[in-house]
Each structure stands twice: as structure tokens, then as C-alpha cells.
Image: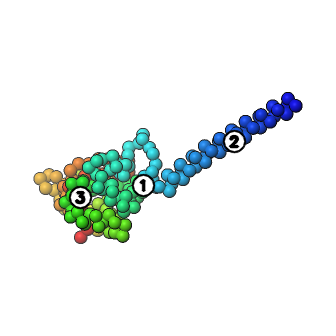
Amino acid sequence: MKRTLILCTALILGLSSCKENESHASHNAHSSETAVLAGQEAVQDDDSNPDIVKLAVATPDLSTLVTAVQASGLATSLSNAGPFTVFAPTNEAFGKLPKEALERLLKEENKSELGDILGHHTYVGVLKLDQLSDGQKLGMVDGKSVLVTFQDGVPTIDGAKILGSVSASNGIVHLVDTVLLPK
């Protein structure tokens, strides 16, 4: 009887432990599944340099751009390996647009148009400031080109001044003072 009691206790403890491990495994599988379903931008990594999307999210002056990237569904694309060069309009740059135009673009039915505009701000590859030259044309993700010119030694992209640059894990972000509209 004593031996049976010990075996039953061991069996109950063993099953309990298995159940707990299944619960942890299920939770971990669910967390991984959530990250996969949410896309690369959902991956938590506080040790590496941030990707372009995480960098934008952490920059208060790019909150309108972050809203536009999320509304267009491009957060996953801009979180991927790249490399990308993004000419990121500041909140002030978006403020130059008519309010109605921005509100219209952020609507679900205009997702494609918004994606094209954001694609016009994105170049595949890394272009640092010292790699830009006067008169240079850059082929953007939307299939159209932008023109690099220099004004008083400061590079502009289709007339938008580059205000500053920050490296990301998957490219570089150049803050610009104007929204680039495809022609």
C-alpha cells in the first residue's frame, strides 16, 4: 500500500509538471505566433540598434509618419532587413499639407495612394549624405525618381531639405522638411 501511494504521488507530480510545461510551451508558441502574425515590427529587441520603424516610433517628431506607415500597412516592410534609405518627413513637414489631404490619405480606402507616397520617400540601399551629389537622380520604391540638389551646401531631395540623419539597423533615415509628392 505504501509503495502504491508513493507511485501515485510521483505520477500526480509528474503529470502536474507536464501540464505546467505544456502551458509554458503553449504560451511561448502563442507569443511566437503573435510576433509572426504581427510582422517583423512586433519583435522585441532592446539590445540591437532599432530598425527604421522602431527608430521612427521612438522619435516624437515623426509621429505623423508613423501613423501614415501604420495606415498604409508598410510597417512590416520597413522593419525587414533592407537596406533602405528613408527620407522621413517631420510632423512639421506633414503640417504643410492641407489638413483635409492628410485626413483623406489616412482613410482605409486610400491605403494604396498613401503607400505610393510613402514609397516615394524610400530608396532601396543605404545612401549617406556624402554619397549624394548635385543633379543625382534616385529611383524610389514607387518606381519614380527624385532629384538631389544642393542649396548652400545642404542636400535637398526634390526641394525638401535634409535636416538630419540617423542610422538604423536596416538602413538610414534622413529627416526632411517637406513631404515628397510623386510627379
How many angstroms separate mark 1 from mark 2 (CA)?
37 Å
Pointer 2 residue: 18
Horizontal and vertical percent position of residue 117: 30, 65
Horizontal and vertical percent position of residue 131: 25, 53
Q: Quadrant of the C terminus?
A: bottom left
Res 78 → quadrant: bottom left
Horizontal and vertical percent position of residue 12: 75, 38
Residue 57 in the figure: left or right of residue 134: right
User: Which of these two is toward me, 180 or 35?
Assistant: 35
Which of the two labelled residues, at mark 1 and mark 3, occupies the earlier sequence position?
1
How many angstroms separate mark 1 from mark 3 (CA)?
25 Å
Mark 1 or mark 3, whichever is nearer to me: 3
Task: Point out the residue furthest to the right here.
Answer: 1
Res 14 → quadrant: top right
Q: Quadrant of the N terminus?
A: top right
The answer to whether marks 1 and 3 mark residues whose Cβ atoms lie closer than 8 Å is no
Residue 7 in sight here = yes
Pointer 3 residue: 94
The residue located at (80%, 36%) in the rendering is 8
